[in-house]
Amino acid sequence: MATAVEKDKKMSKDTTNPYESMIQRFDVAAHIVGLDSDTYNILKTPHRQYLVSLPVEMDNGTVKVFEGYRIVHNASRGPSKGGIRYSLEVNLDEVKALAAWMTWKCAIADIPYGGAKGGIHCDPSSMSVGELERLNTCLHARNV
């Protein structure tokens, strides 16, 4: 019989989509704790999903439009919390998975917050401080 660690490694190899990987792990946990199907269906799906376009004036005067995501996975325990990931590899499914993980972390630690996460598809290492500041200003102006 496979150990929990071996099963976890197999799940990681079987799934490259971070959201699908989170759902697989959630399925196992839901089964272990005997979660009812109504609660399961509520908890597997994010409450809100935002996709935003963020036009930013670059230092050379051109405008570049960045794609951003904000996921509020669950806010039943209180206001949702979760940072913003800036990366060329960020995508909607990754942000959905990270928001769900924040929900689980807050619940397990009995912190009165829900889970959320944001992501902006960009290469922050190639951007100036001014460009990053304008990107953040644009993001916050959209109340996401």
Image: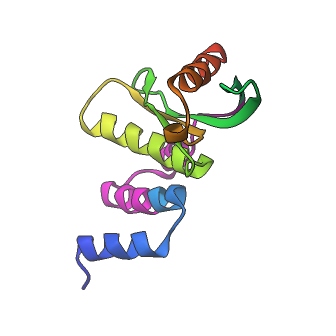
- Report the front residue among 3 and 68: 68
Q: Is any part of residue 33 visible from this angle?
A: yes
Q: Position of residue 102 (x, y in %)?
A: 39, 38
Looking at the figure, which quarter contains the C terminus? top right
Q: Residue furthest bottom?
A: 1
Magenta stretch, residue numbers: 24-53
Verify whether residue 54 appears in magenta: no
Q: Residue furthest front?
A: 60
Q: How many marks?
A: 0
Residue 64, placed above or below residue 27? above
**Left or right of 111 on screen, residue 64:** right
Q: Position of residue 4 (x, y in %)?
A: 25, 71
Q: Position of residue 22 (x, y in %)?
A: 45, 56
Q: Position of residue 79 (x, y in %)?
A: 44, 20
Residue 23, placed above or below residue 53? below
**Left or right of 35 on screen, residue 142:** right
Residue 128, placed above or below residue 86? above
Q: Quadrant of residue 57?
A: top right
Q: Quadrant of residue 61?
A: top right
Looking at the figure, which quarter contains the N terminus? bottom left
Q: Residue at x 57, y 40 (%)?
A: 46
- Report the front residue among 26 and 117: 117
Q: Residue at x 61, y 47 (%)?
A: 92
Which colour assignment does the render follow?
A: rainbow
Q: Residue at x 69, y 25 (%)?
A: 56
Residue 79, placed above or below residue 107? above
Q: Is any part of residue 144 visible from this angle?
A: no
Q: Residue at x 25, y 71 (%)?
A: 5
